Amino acid sequence: MSTWNRSKKIIMGVAVVLIASFLLALFALYQFSAPQSKAPKERMVINLGTSEKELIHQLHIQGYIRSPWAFNMVLTIKGWHGKIEPGGYLISKAMSAWTLADTLVNHPYQRWVLLPEGLRVEELAEILGSKLRWGEEQKSDFLNFAQEGYMFPDTYLLNLDYSGKEVAQRLMSNFNEKVRELFLEAQQANIRNDTLIILASLVQRETASEEEMPLISGIIWNRWLKGMRFEIDATVQYALGEEGNWWPMVKPEDYKVDSPYNTYLYEGRPPAPICSPGLAAIRAVIYPEETEYLYFLHDQGGKIHPARTYEQHLQNIEKYLK
């Protein structure tokens, strides 16, 4: 074979490789490109518990990305694996894989917020502030409108641009919806709405499990009906709570703190709830366990030990807490 023919074959081979590489590059770029040239933004909600793999599959089958491989490559290059949080997003099929990934990592418009039972409004403000990226002004706005005990503990999908007032109204509206039937049941049992929620907040803070709520409710009712002071540590904690330590350990001298929430010092129920109770605690106040017990304590393992007399209660203290 002549030198020219050999050179010609080499040139053709190189050309084929270059063309193949170019076509491969075009194909790769195509995989990263937007599926459509024009498309409106749509709301997409990533639910709690959705894995990254499940999300990418969902984006692919719904037509937001051309290639799961390309989207994964974007997350790898940008260091964004594991950075997409559950929430609400405004995305479009006219977004490239790069833009879509950036939107899902850095630009949510809604966030899921879990608000557990038994928290006071200041704790709710801290959780909401962290999840919704609030400043002090928005937290103060929330606290100005929040009503202790009536901010229903639940999982919420909330807009990041909601004001503190709007979030407070959302929580209270949810409370009214969820508790409406229980208020009717309480009325049939001659329990006022405010009394119901105040006592439920005490039950919520004093229990280690939902199963023991009716028993503790029964003990609280027994003490009240006998004219005894409630003597509940959680009310003293509420009176003493401050930023950084909303539920401090109660010391013997704290039982003398002059506060209407101190149920060691003042008779009857506190003037207002001390936390946000859940449905189980509210129901327990309406349907308390019939019992002769007047005292209770929890041991180091969280097990409850009730007592009928003060002497038995002292024995339980000696046995389980010393």
Image (cartoon, helix red, strand yellow):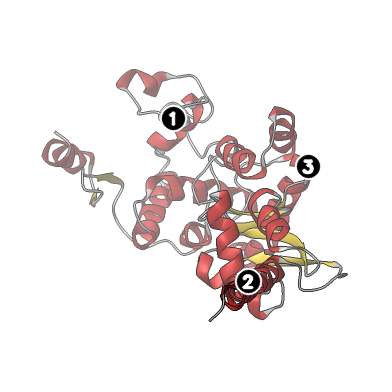
Residue 55 left/right relative to 280: right
Q: Which mark is residue 163?
A: 3
Q: Does residue 47 appear in the picture of this structure?
A: no
* Marks 1, 3: nearer the viewer: 3
How far across and down, in percent of the image, does residue 116 sit?
51, 51
Q: Secondary structure at mark 3?
A: loop
Packing grade of label 1 (10 A; few <14, some 14-19, many >=20) is: many
Circle 2 residue:
11
N-terminal of the pair, mark 2 or mark 1, is 2
At a point 64% along the width and 58% down the height, the residue shown is 87
Residue 124 to residue 2: above or below: above
* Residue 306: x %, y % from top left: 25, 50
Asked which secondary structure carries label 2, the reply is helix
Position of 9 compared to 97: left or right?
Answer: left
Any mark on residue 47, and which? none
- Select label 2 or label 3 by which is in front: 2
The kind of residue tagged 3 is: Ser
Q: For the point 37% across and 53% down, which residue is it? A: 216
